[in-house]
């Protein structure tokens, strides 16, 4: 597919949608008109991403987002509530200040990981050392006491800070291949270095902490310019900080060459004990079949290196905007239309799994679930998730979608049931027809998925607007369909052992998390 600039794509998409003035369905026409002429997406995105910010499970910002969403729905005359599904360790991110103070002074790009212990209001200054390459765990045990009073680097030195696509564009074939070979060798050697300590990547920070290290220094490069993955800390008493590739490499090379870098770290965070966690649920009540349900689905929580803009702010915006439009254009649906903004998807689909467990009366009467959770791009893939007759009803509903939105969507029927990845899988496991509205890449995996660069400016609003139109029309069609959707499952291919393929099992949510 030829790539278009954002502006060109936006003009093309908007023009294409608007030129389809009449579809002989006033509701579809109304959805398209409202989405294009009265979009609330930019306003919602600013309030959610810029004002509230990231939505880590258990954080005050997550609760603030839950309350904000309920208030928004009430502004639109849509009933909404926050429904408790569990409890989590309460933690609030504060500022992170990381500076190199020797052999020269430089402010470093980095931040503490989620749930990292703070430095208790103090600035901790100490030498930086690298986990050494020793013969075995006995040698490491002898070395371990030397970490007392020091920061310890636990990530590999990356041989290049340039993404592979940059090497492919400008490097010779020989230099690119050499770099990849050297990187593979170095990666294998680092994995062996960690294994020889007798610890895993997860248990090593705890061992270093117990031995007296004042902090753990890591760098989880996302293989793109300026992008690092920001996940959670496992230390209990000392901070764990992630430092950008460029600055991490500087520290590593200085330590390796014997120049003994010294850094100062001030990591502010607050512990809030055990706090309740919620799903935000909103509904437009059905008039003819109120006990049958069409569900719009998107997880509400995020990691907190950025502001969770494309994971999953854009999915959230898509479903909120679809509900707003439906309430205005289609206020009396035949079936009840629910929207679920799920909590703690990032820790294992916990909010949606809890909803499935807590509401069997809804799950057994689901007409369809439409979930969006893989970035800002317009939807281009729709799988039947293993439901044998999904092609029938999804095909009929898609036929009502404007061509400019429908044409790029590749369908796969019956497809295979998703066992994880996002919240639709919680419903699929329970046998409910649930589908992922899978979107165009926009370098999602490298640059915004769980990274420090997942911010407002990465949102492509024309694509999100297209997705809101699609979600609203699919919900409308699912609500109006006189037939109940079939739940008959296809026969799954045999696995590698020749055993019959099995449908994903229902899994229990973690109801109390972050405390181990």
Image (spheres, rainbow, N blue to C red):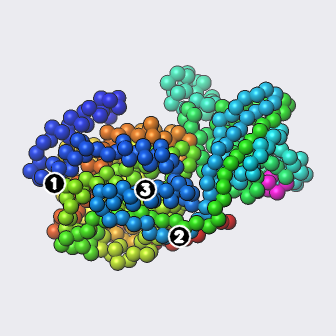
Comes first in the chain, label 3 or label 2: 3
**Vertical arrangement, residue 63 with respect to residue 447, above or below:** below
- Where is residue 75? Give x, y as percent: 32, 56
Asked if residue 345 is among those painted magenta in the image, a careful observer would answer: no
* Secondary element type, mark 3: helix
Specify the quadrant that holds the N terminus. top left
Q: Can residue 132 be seen in this view?
A: no
Comes first in the chain, label 2 or label 1: 1
Q: In this view, does 493 lie to the left or right of 470?
A: right
- Where is residue 250? Give x, y as percent: 72, 30
Q: Which mark is residue 86?
A: 2
Looking at the image, which residue is at 38% across and 47% down? 44
Q: How many marks?
A: 3
Q: Give the range drawn in magenta.
A: 206-211
The residue labelled by disc 1 is 27
Q: Nearer the viewer, mark 3 or mark 2?
A: 3
**Vertical arrangement, residue 383 with respect to residue 244, above or below:** below
Comes first in the chain, label 3 or label 1: 1
């Amino acid at each position: 597919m030829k790539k278009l600039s954002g502006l060109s794509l936006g003009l093309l998409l908007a023009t294409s949608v608007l030129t389809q003035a009449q579809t002989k369905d006033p509701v579809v026409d109304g959805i398209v008109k409202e989405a294009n002429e009265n979009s609330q997406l930019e306003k919602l995105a600013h309030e959610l991403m810029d004002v509230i910010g990231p939505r880590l499970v258990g954080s005050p910002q997550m609760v603030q987002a839950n309350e904000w969403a309920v208030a928004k729905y009430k502004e639109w005359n849509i009933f909404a509530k926050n429904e408790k599904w569990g409890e989590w360790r309460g933690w609030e991110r504060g500022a992170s200040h990381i500076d190199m103070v020797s052999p020269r002074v430089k402010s470093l790009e980095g931040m503490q990981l989620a749930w990292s212990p703070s430095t208790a209001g103090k600035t901790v200054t100490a030498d930086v050392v690298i986990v050494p390459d020793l013969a075995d765990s006995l040698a490491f045990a002898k070395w371990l006491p030397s970490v007392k009073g020091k920061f310890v680097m636990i990530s590999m030195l990356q041989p290049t800070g340039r993404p592979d696509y940059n090497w492919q564009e400008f490097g010779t074939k020989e230099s690119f291949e050499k770099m990849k070979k050297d990187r593979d060798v170095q990666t294998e050697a680092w994995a062996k270095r960690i294994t020889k300590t007798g610890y895993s990547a997860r248990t090593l920070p705890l061992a270093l902490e117990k031995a007296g290290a004042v902090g753990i220094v890591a760098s989880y490069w996302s293989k793109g310019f300026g992008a690092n993955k920001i996940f959670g800390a496992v230390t209990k008493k000392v901070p764990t900080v992630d430092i950008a590739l460029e600055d991490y490499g500087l520290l590593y090379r200085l330590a390796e060459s014997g120049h003994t870098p010294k850094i100062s770290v001030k990591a502010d965070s607050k512990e809030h004990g055990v706090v309740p966690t919620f799903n935000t649920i909103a509904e437009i009540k059905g008039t003819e079949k109120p006990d049958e349900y069409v569900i719009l689905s998107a997880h509400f929580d995020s990691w907190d290196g950025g502001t969770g803009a494309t994971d999953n702010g854009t999915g959230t915006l898509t479903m909120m905007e679809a509900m707003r439009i439906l309430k205005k254009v289609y206020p009396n649906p035949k079936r009840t239309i629910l929207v679920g903004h799920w909590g703690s998807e990032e820790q294992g689909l916990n909010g949606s799994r809890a909803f499935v467990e807590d509401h069997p009366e809804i799950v057994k009467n689901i007409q369809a679930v439409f979930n969006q959770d893989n970035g800002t791009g317009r939807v281009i893939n729709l799988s039947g998730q293993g439901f044998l007759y999904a092609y029938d009803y999804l095909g009929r509903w898609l036929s009502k979608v404007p061509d400019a939105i429908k044409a790029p969507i590749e369908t796969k029927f019956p497809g295979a049931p998703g066992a994880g990845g996002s919240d639709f899988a919680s419903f699929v496991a329970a046998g409910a027809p649930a589908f992922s509205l899978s979107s165009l890449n926009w370098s999602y995996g490298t640059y915004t998925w769980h990274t420090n660069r997942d911010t407002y400016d990465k949102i492509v609003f024309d694509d999100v607007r297209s997705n809101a139109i699609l979600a609203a029309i699919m919900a409308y069609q699912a609500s109006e369909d006189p037939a109940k959707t079939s739940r008959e499952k296809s026969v799954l291919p045999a696995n590698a052992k020749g055993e019959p393929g099995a449908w994903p099992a229902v899994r229990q949510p973690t109801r109390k998390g972050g405390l181990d």
